[in-house]
Image (cartoon, rainbow, N blue to C red):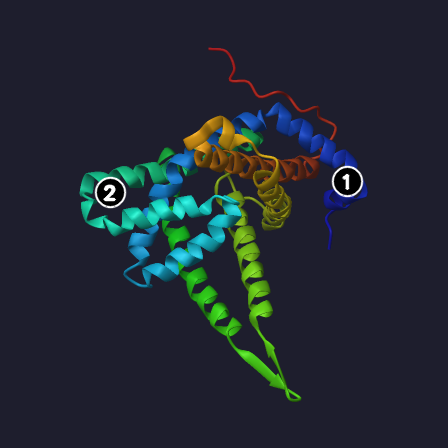
């Protein structure tokens, strides 16, 4: 059953979208997304290295890399192979990892989550003004997320392996045989989409201060996921047809392309959070309040 403010939003979706975009602009959403993208670029490879090294004791390394390659393409459309090549090269020389390097990689892996939490505090500034999170909780959250993502990758790898094995089978019926390869491809896509929505929902539930409604978190997650599905296909088409970044940036092309993809993804992630914040404002009867530009205040 729809709540009163949800029904009101669905009744006037255009006004809600306009209000959300104005609030996102007032909160400097694009600037925050740029910061998240930069630190995500620093965090991605160390996080993947730690994850694969840890899980390679449980699952075959090649199977892990295949799963990573499939779903990294969702995050970095058209440029996941370069990341995988660097990851495979590092894993081939894993004996060089010492305690200092391990601690360094763990620290850099956590940077993106720390910056994301700070960005969420800007989007949900009405929550921060009422209640602040203990600094020890903020310090622990990134590392809990690293472990959770590793466990999620383990489950996805196991399920994806079973689905791929099913795709190699054939069904015999009325003297004809049909391959299950197409069904396997659809199931793998749905698995990735469901995993994407699940991760986004968990981010929206954990990163903002205070307890968030599961319904609102799902609304934000589905919004961000669907927008990203459109955006990543547009990015693939852009890089394949119109992009001239290889001419301009030369050897830096992959880095620039990955950074651009991460910034688009971060923008949509924060936009989903802004959708949730506006739902909360609607529930508190603040729909008529004019979005105020975010400022740091005066000392």
Q: Secondary structure at mark 2?
A: helix
Which residue is painted at 73% across and 51% down in the image? 2
| Image-based side of 107 in relation to 274, left or right | left
Tell which of 32 and 2 is nearer to you: 32
Residue 126 occupies quadrant:
top right
Q: Please report contact status of discs 1 and 2: CB closer than 8 Å, yes or no.
A: no
Q: Position of residue 67 (x, y in %)?
A: 43, 58
Residue at the spot 37% in from the left edge and 47% down from the top edge: 85
Residue visible at 33% across and 63% down?
60
Could one spot residue 168 in this view of the protein? yes
Label 1, label 2: how far apart the Cα atoms are: 49 Å
Residue behind mark 1: 13
Tell which tag, 1 or 2, sits nearer the viewer.
2
Residue 102, label in figure: 2
Q: Is residue 46 above or below residue 64?
A: above
Residue situated furthest front in the rendering? 247
- Residue 233 image offset from top left, x and y in percent: 61, 46
In-front residue for pair 207/42: 42
Position of the N terminus, as image quadrant, is bottom right
Q: Earlier in the sequence, mark 1 or mark 2?
A: 1
Q: Secondary structure at mark 1?
A: helix
* Residue 11 place in picture, x, y as percent: 81, 43
Residue 162 point in image, percent of width and height: 46, 70
Give the camera-side residue of 120 and 90.
90
Residue furthest to the top in view is 299
**Which residue sits furthest bottom?**
175
Which residue shows up at 63% across the image and 29% down it? 24
Is 46 situated above or below 23?
below
């Amino acid at each position: 059953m729809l709540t009163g403010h949800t029904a009101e939003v669905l009744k006037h979706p255009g006004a809600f979208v306009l209000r959300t975009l104005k609030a996102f602009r007032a909160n400097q959403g694009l600037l925050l997304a740029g910061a998240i993208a930069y630190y995500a670029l620093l965090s991605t490879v160390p996080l993947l290295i730690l994850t694969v090294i840890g899980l390679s004791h449980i699952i075959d390394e090649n199977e892990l890399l295949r799963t990573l390659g499939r779903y990294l393409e969702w995050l970095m459309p058209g440029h996941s192979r370069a990341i995988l090549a660097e990851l495979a090269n590092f894993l081939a020389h894993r004996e060089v990892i010492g305690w200092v390097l391990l601690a360094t990689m763990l620290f850099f892996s956590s940077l993106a989550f720390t910056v994301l939490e700070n960005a969420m505090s800007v989007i949900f500034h009405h929550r921060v003004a009422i209640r602040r999170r203990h600094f020890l909780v903020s310090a622990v959250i990134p590392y809990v997320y690293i472990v959770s993502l590793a466990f999620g990758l383990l489950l996805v790898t196991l399920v994806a392996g079973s689905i791929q094995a099913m795709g190699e089978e054939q069904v015999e019926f009325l003297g004809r045989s049909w391959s299950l390869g197409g069904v396997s491809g659809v199931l793998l896509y749905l698995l990735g989409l469901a995993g994407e929505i699940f991760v986004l929902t968990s981010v929206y539930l954990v990163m903002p201060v205070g307890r968030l409604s599961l319904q609102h978190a799902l609304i934000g997650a589905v919004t961000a996921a669907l927008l990203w599905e459109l955006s990543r296909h547009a990015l693939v088409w852009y890089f394949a047809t119109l992009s001239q970044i290889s001419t301009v940036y030369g050897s830096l092309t992959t880095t620039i392309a990955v950074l651009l993809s991460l910034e688009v993804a971060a923008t949509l992630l924060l936009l989903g959070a802004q959708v949730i914040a506006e739902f909360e404002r609607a529930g508190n009867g603040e729909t008529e309040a004019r979005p105020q530009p975010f400022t740091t205040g005066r000392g």
